[in-house]
Amino acid sequence: MSGFCIEGGYSFEGEICVQGAKNAVLPILAATIINGGKNVIHNCPRLRDVEKTVDVLRALGCRVVPLGNTLVVDSEPMDKFTIEDSLMRQMRSSIIFLGAIIARCGEAVVSMPGGCEIGIRPIDIHMKALERLGIEITEEHGYILCRAEKLSGAHIHLDFPSVGATENIMLAAVCAEGTTVVTNAAREPEIVDLQSFLRRMGAKVSGAGTSTIEIEGSARLYGVDYTVMPDRIAAGTYLACCGAAGGKILLKNTNPGDMTSTLSCLSGMGAKIRQEKNSVYMSAGKRLKAFGTIRTMPYPGFPTDMQSPFLALGCTASGTGVITETIFENRFQNAEELLRMGADIRVDGKTAVIVGVKRLHGAVVQARELRGGASLVTAALGAEGTTTVMNAEYIDRGYEGFEKNLSMCGAHVARIN
């Protein structure tokens, strides 16, 4: 078990080159198996979740060669369609392989996925959508068995704009006969990035970024070179860290257009924001204003993954903030740990009320999931004294070189075992 030791009270000043997007690279890596060729994927963040995705690719028979932040994936030798339980349990996003394996092999066997315990993430919506494409699905002994004699295009309406279900449909439908139309599709920028990758390899996909996506089945697909988009959640977390500590930060290799709700909230709290095409500059005083009300929503609303860092940021803001979490029911696990640091937070079901205090104090706290862990580091940067955040492995799932990047901006952060 490892952790982070943070000595609070040091102002930010520096710049960070934002990593490739975790939530974009995972479905793109899954998509590489569809074309049966050599794919060179650039700007891949070195994360635990990416490592586990590579393990899945290799278990399926693909050859994967890491070259720094580039992964070379040759899916031509793929000869399996089963993902063992031990791999599926390690991350929720492993379910995204389902559509890709079916597209390549006509059948797939996977177990129920694991990952951070932030709440129920039912995959029924995935199953219902895939059945519309002609896939027969049964469950046996904790495994999901999928088989399709032929994939056929269909009109699919999602009851909820699920990112994972939208991606699974796109991955399966590129090899279906006919046209598939998805309505109430997820609109996240990562969906647009997956569309760009699929188009690069010869698929006919349009509409990503809107609520309607159309996929025309393609006869032949090709291996390609592709560069993954920047990570808007990592970028927003670093801005929250700067807001908690006070100071200035320049984020390079980022897309401000993907972060509108996050930047708007920070601006409303009193931070000064300057946006350029591929960068964001922010300066913040020692104490920001409370954010008022935040309600998490599917994109383009406020992202659930940014809720936790803003919960921490609100702990020392001037005034009272209210967060309503509409996506996951266990997103406030970090509140209990923040209370150990002197925060004033009251949680009632899906709502948290945060009354800002002048200063938090250091404590030993436990990360229980990815974004909640990052929020504890955020709080520690502005706290008085030393904070130890245990279970750094959760944070490593989504942030490349977290302590290094923070240290380059003047923070006092060290990894401990």
Image (cartoon, grey):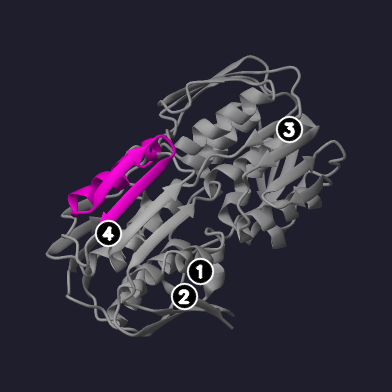
Percent across and percent down for residue 415 are 54, 77
Give neighbour class at mark 2: few <14, some 14-19, many 20+ (Cα, 10 Å): many
| Closer to us: 266 or 186 | 266
Residue 101 appears in the rendering:
no
**Numbered range of the magenta stretch:** 256-283
Q: Position of residue 269 (x, y in %)?
A: 19, 54
Tell me whether circle 1 and circle 2 mark residues in contact (CB < 8 Å).
Answer: yes
- Three-letter amino acid code at the position of disc 2: Val
Q: Tell me the element at label 1.
A: helix
Q: Residue at coordinates 63% horizontally, 14% vertically from top-left? A: 178
The residues bearing labels 4 and 1 have C-alpha atoms spaced at a distance of 31 Å
Tag 2 and tag 4, C-beta contact below 8 Å = no
Residue under label 1: 403
Q: Secondary structure at mark 4?
A: loop
Q: Name which residue type carries label 4.
A: Lys
Q: Which residue is mark 2?
A: 413
Classify mark 3: helix, strand or loop. Answer: helix
Task: Give whichever of 411, 149 is nearer the camera.
Answer: 411
Residue ID for mark 4 = 350
